[in-house]
Amino acid sequence: MTLNKEILQSAIEEFVLSKDDLQKVREDFTNEVKATEGSSLKMLPSFLSTPTGNEKGTYLALDFGGTNVRVLKIKLLTKGKYETIDKVAAPLIKTGEYDYVHKEATGEELFDFIAKLVKEALAGDTGEIYLGHTFSFPSEQLDLANAKLISWTKEFQTRNVEGENITELLKASLKRANIENVIPVAIINDTVATLLAAAYANNNALIGSIYATGHNTCYLEKNYNGKPMIINLESGGFSKIPQSSFDKLLDEMSEKKGAQFLEKATSGRYVGELFSIATAKAFGTDKLFDFSSVELCDMIVNNSANRFIKLKTNYVPTSDEAELFTALAKNILNRSALLVTSTFLGLYDHIGEETLSIGIDGSLYGKNPFLQEIISKELKKTSEKISAFKVEDGSAIGAAIAAAMGSIS
Ligand code: GLC
């Protein structure tokens, strides 16, 4: 295999966005948040406002939306404090054993698997307990306890789930597993969970975001038909972003073509794939080498491009060439963080509060201080009064808070 350095160099440049590009993303984002029709943002009401901080008690939190399902028993202690009493987790795919996100798997099988985990988390407990469910996919909320999946994202394909009431699927599985003491009272998006967890501790938190396998943001709309309401933007679906030739190829190869443009340019599920596509082009091959977001970050932080290129492609790069691959990883991730920040700023312009904090959960953000820095620096350019902070375990804590809010409403 030979490496064409010119192609690699031009790929690196394709991932650079100008100030004007970013300003346009910011303005288009504000416009789409405000638009009453024709927006690529779904703007889904959550049937929840932010918590008071006084919520307390013990709840089950079911967190479903990435590669692992988790069930936690969480004791809320008010004002941002909580204790995790029990925790069980299992991957949705075990190679050679099962795959619950594949198109051969059914919704029943998937939720029976989840019900088994709920049973494990209960550990023999038979007392009545309320459950909050973080379900991290675009869903139409019927009320706080019930939501219908609009469509899968993040390449999930399980059959007989799209269009279904997720809470009904869960309840049916709990019944089949003879679990009678668990009462699902709230189903929320993970961005909403993150905002709930952030606002439980911090009054200025008005935006919640996930920067992980997927990417999405929600915010507190102070006046939604006269009352406050958290709105899940489904911002991964935002379509007004400049696309490189690699973004277009990635979209062609994806499960849902023509959708989730922002997510496909920014999130952990896809940034590695963008690198793989660009690398394949530079080597003049159709074969993709399957790089992950974790490897891209490692290349940047530990200067390990040399090792990963050799490992995946068998090609031994010179040190100049390795630097080019590092630059490619850097530009892909830099663009990702800049795009995400532009959408935060677009939302900031819409909300119109001077002081505001953004709670962010997710592994891509949480594990990579260099991404956190890019976001903070960009926000500061607009105002010192906007800040972003890490929300630990937001998806789970938020589910418990939603259960607390749901059990009294
Ligand atoms: C995808 C989902 C969205 C979720 C995000 C982060 O974008 O559509 O609902 O919030 O991933 O998990």
Image (tube, rainbow, N blue to C red):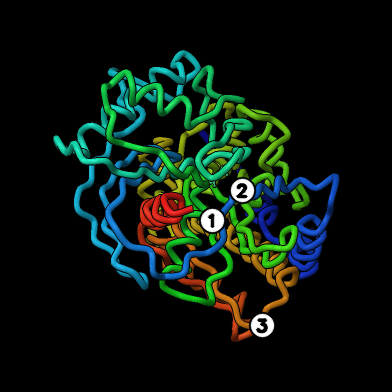
> In x, y percent, where is residue 237?
68, 44
What residue is shown with label 1? Answer: 324
Which of labels 2 and 3 is toward the front? 3
Q: Is mark 2 within 8 Å of ligand 1?
A: no
Task: Please tell me which residue is depicted at 38% across the width and 64% down the height of the picture.
Answer: 55
Q: Are marks 3 and 1 in contact (CB under 8 Å)?
A: no
Q: Disc 1 on helix, strand or loop?
A: helix
First along the sequence among labels 2 and 3: 2
What residue is shown with label 3? Answer: 354
Residue type at the position of mark 3: Glu
Outermost residue on the front side: it is: 408
Outermost residue on the left side: it is: 124
First along the sequence among labels 2 and 1: 2
Residue type at the position of mark 2: Leu
Residue type at the position of mark 1: Leu
In the foreground, 288 or 133: 133
> In x, y percent, where is residue 327?
54, 59
Horizontal side of 342 relative to 203 (left or right) equals right
Above or below for 272 versus 387:
above
Q: Where on the image, by quarter, is ligand 1?
A: top right
Could you say which disc has been placed on residue 162 in the image?
none
Image quarter of residue 204? bottom right
Task: Please tell me which residue is depicted at 61% across the width and 76% down the height of the picture.
Answer: 379
Q: Is mark 1 within 8 Å of ligand 1?
A: no
Q: How many marks?
A: 3
Q: How far apart in space, not on screen, are marks 3 and 1 (Cα)?
A: 41 Å
Could you say which disc has been placed on residue 8 in the image?
2
Q: Are marks 2 and 1 in contact (CB under 8 Å)?
A: yes
> In x, y percent, where is residue 346?
72, 66
Bin the neighbour count of mark 2 within 10 Å (Cα to Cα): few under 14, some 14-19, many 20 and up: many
